[in-house]
Image (spheres, rainbow, N blue to C red):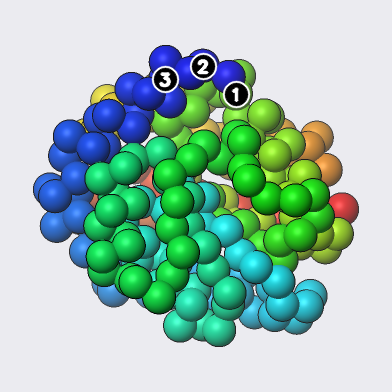
Amino acid sequence: MDASRLHTTARAYDAIAPQYVALVGDGLARLPLDRAIVEAFAGLVRQAGPGPVGDLGCGPGYLAAHLRDLGLDVFGVDLSEALIAHARERYPDLPFSVGSMAALDVADGTLGGIVSWYSLIHAAPADVPVYLAEFHRVLAPGGQLLLGFFESGGEPLSPFAHKVTTAYRWPIDRLAGLAGAAGFEEVGRMLRQPLENERFQHGRLLLRKR
């Protein structure tokens, strides 16, 4: 795990936190397909047996709040102290903490679900299996995992100049393969085409811990 990359990512988001919060808003208001897959994830968690859900890389907390409104017991974790401060102020009823997704302060097999919504995009590709292994560790058997990411659109895995710090576009089959190797089975997937103000295709993977 590249500690310098984690530090760089955290400081980059700290530096632009007010602008980032203003840009993303509540994140899902004008994205019906994204809301639909988040709602499907919540339904699968409830069906499997309610348990705590981690919004990992939660940023300003809007997705954690949406999951709360869908009836889930949610907490959020993010590297950025500034974004966590905003999330705590905006959603004081939800627990948020500063930390790394690769080393969660969570007991083995205790979570009903995990959402990683554009939080693996800044990870070095070689580190992604480490994150997936940690997700697998903390999820209960049958626990649900939702990944949101920039999809490569038929091109190889590649970095790009994200507005905050370097990020990666993943071929959906390649990321699904890494998840399978980490002990997850695919439940469903979505490819969403970019909107007028977006550059890239978006990928979503719904997965379940074997």
Label 1: few (<14), some or many (≥20) within 10 Å?
A: few
Q: Is residue 202 above or below residue 26?
A: above
Query: What residue lies at 33% left-to-right and 52% top-to-bottom?
Result: 84
Q: In the image, residue 19 lies at what x, y percent?
A: 12, 48
Q: Residue at x 14, y 50 (%)?
A: 18
- Label 3 and label 1: CA atoms lie apart by 11 Å
Dot 3 crowding, Cα within 10 Å, few <14, some 14–19, many 20+? some
Mark 1 and mark 2 in contact (Cβ < 8 Å)? Answer: yes
Return the residue nearer the eye: 12 or 175: 12
Residue at numbered disc 3: 5
Mark yes or no: residue 40 visible.
no
Q: Which mark is residue 44?
A: none
Q: Amino acid at mark 2?
A: Asp
Q: Secondary structure at mark 2?
A: loop
Q: Nearer the viewer, mark 3 or mark 1?
A: 3
Counting residues from the start of the chain, the first of labels 3 and 1 encountered is 3
Q: Residue 43 or 99: which is nearer the viewer?
A: 99
Q: CA distance from mark 2 to mark 1?
A: 8 Å
Please determine whether, in this image, residue 209 is positioned above or below residue 163. below
| Above or below, 100 relative to 138 | above
Name the image quarter holding the N terminus. top right
Q: Which mark is residue 2?
A: 2
Q: What amino acid does circle 1 point to? A: Asp
